[in-house]
Image (spheres, grey):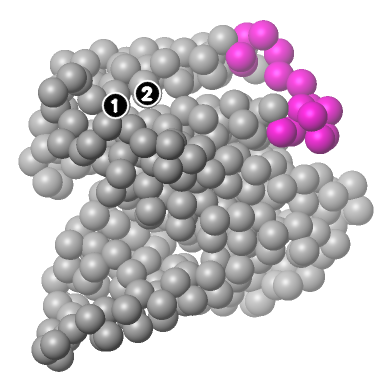
Amino acid sequence: MVPALLATFLFATSSVAARRSIHHLGPANASLFRILLAATVLGLYAHIWGAGLSGPALPWFVVSGLIGFGICDTALFLALPLLGAQLASLMVQCLAAPIAALTEWAWLGTRIDGDKLVGGAVILAGVALALLPRRGTNPHPPLTPRAIVLGVIAAAGQGVGAVLSRHGQLLSRDAGVPIDGLSVAYQRILAGVAFTFVWWSWQRARTRSAATNPSPALPWARAWPWVVVNGLSGPCLGVACYQWAFQTHPTGVVMSITALTPLVVIPLAWGIEGVKPTIRGVVGGALAVFGVIWMALHP
């Protein structure tokens, strides 16, 4: 339970830092620089103290990273303009957990007891209550089939990628060579680096072909602290805690807890950006926290 809660807080911190770095650098640059930083830090750890690129589950971790960092993040990036940040976050967080639980049950035979199902459902209901926009407040057009498909792909990518990662951890454990969370995060992020670099190159080529004036210099003086916080708290330490949680809990349980991430963003955004939470956000957050407490009391 503790590693999943740590991952939730780290992912929320990364989300707030990502907003600030994107504001200064743009989404393509911010995404590339944060994942390069995370991969460098994780690689130094993994090759000096950790497992490096060894272990019987390396192919599973690479495929998991390709799906989680690649397909999921790209679909989410494309869905954001169509769904808006709130609806996109709602769809991904609320669908990824049950998709992961069903995938792990169908493939690995992992069953989740009734108490944890109740707790997970309460968490997801709280997230939905807090994040679902009120009528008349969503500036984006009505939902389209394309927007729904992209949102479902992003959620499925996150859920299936997590299940593949847990499968790799179980294989490593059964082979007698368990791998620590930081090393798993490193092996997963490699495919994400390659995918993100291809995406960045394509975006850069499009921007250059459309631009008539030279691109302005990037404001690194203001951006680099946010890039560092984003890279270390999200794809580095956050994913490491995520993988640590998978060593002791089923995927559906872990992802139900990390579905709290958008709610943790609310007080962080209030303190850093001055965005005040709504009453419904507070009520939904309290409901979700009750779900976490319920799961903690029914191990």
Q: Which mark, by number, is residue 96?
A: none
Range of magenta residues? 103-117
Q: Residue at x 31, y 39 (%)?
A: 83
Q: Is residue 13 visible?
A: no
Q: Residue at x 41, y 80 (%)?
A: 201
- In percent of width and height, residue 292 lies at 48, 20
- The secondary structure type at the circle numbered 1 is helix
Q: Residue at x 45, y 21 (%)?
A: 124
- The secondary structure type at the circle numbered 2 is helix
- In percent of width and height, residue 272 lies at 14, 47
Q: CA distance from mark 1 to mark 2?
A: 6 Å
Q: Provide the major secondary structure of the magenta segment.
A: helix
- In percent of width and height, residue 122 lies at 46, 13
Does residue 142 appear left or right of residue 232 in this picture?
Answer: left
- In percent of width and height, residue 92 lies at 45, 37
Question: On screen, 184 above or below 109?
Answer: below
Does residue 105 belong to the magenta stretch? yes
Q: Quadrant of the C terminus?
A: top right
Which residue is tagged 1?
Answer: 131
Name the residue nearer the viewer: 233 or 152. 152
Q: Amino acid at mark 2?
A: Val
Q: Amino acid at mark 1?
A: Leu
Which residue is tagged 2?
Answer: 127
Furthest residue to the left? Answer: 274
Q: Quadrant of the N terminus?
A: top right
Is the C-beta separation of discs 1 and 2 under 8 Å? Answer: yes
Question: On screen, 95 above or below 186?
Answer: above
Give residue 162's quadrant in the image: top right
Question: On screen, 235 above or below 161?
Answer: below
How busy is the neighbourhood of tag 2: few (under 14 within 10 Å), some, or many (20 plus)?
many
